[in-house]
Amino acid sequence: MDSSLLNYYGRLREGLALSDLTMNHAILIHEKVLNSKFRNGFDPFVLASSCVYIASRYRDTPRTLKQVSTIGGIPRKDIARCYRLLRKNSIEIGIVLPDSYNSDPDLKDWR
């Protein structure tokens, strides 16, 4: 993975307030996709954004597509398209309940 992509992952981590564990999981998903026979032909930054979205859902710190696209500077439509292809072809993602989403990461435990 090149340095510009790692910098992009760092920008997403800081902007979305994600843990190192979540980011490591996103990078593992990214490498799994690159090493598999499934190549989706997407821009590496779109793939990275989709991997962060998947990892945040898997690690119970879900962020919306809008949040990921705003921080990453990638159109939401492209991230959603890549996410659907990954989910359909190679990645299993658990069910996330709507009340686990929040707009502000600092308000996670407001109840």
Image (tube, rainbow, N blue to C red):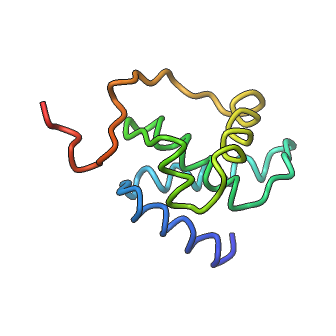
Q: Which residue lies at the image location 47% right of the left edge and 35% below the top edge?
A: 58
Residue 77 falls in image quadrant: top right
Left/right placement of residue 6 relative to residue 109 reads right
Quadrant for the C terminus, please. Answer: top left
Residue 86 falls in image quadrant: top right
Q: Residue furthest left?
A: 111
Q: How many marks?
A: 0
Q: Where is residue 62 in the image (x, y as percent from the top left)?
A: 42, 38
Judging depth in this view, the residue of 110 and 47 nearest the camera is: 110
Q: Which residue lies at the image location 56% right of the left edge and 61% below the top edge?
A: 72
Above-or-below relation of 71 to 35: below
Above-or-below relation of 100 to 32: above
Left/right placement of residue 7 relative to residue 35 reads left
Q: Which residue lies at the image location 54% right of the left edge and 50% below the top edge?
A: 52
Q: Which residue lies at the image location 66% right of the left edge and 33% below the top edge?
A: 91
Left/right placement of residue 1 relative to residue 101 reads right
Q: Position of residue 49 (x, y in %)?
A: 61, 53
Q: Position of residue 12 (x, y in %)?
A: 49, 62
Judging depth in this view, the residue of 26 and 63 nearest the camera is: 63
Quadrant for the N terminus, please. Answer: bottom right
Left/right placement of residue 24 relative to residue 97 reads right
Q: Position of residue 36 (x, y in %)?
A: 80, 45
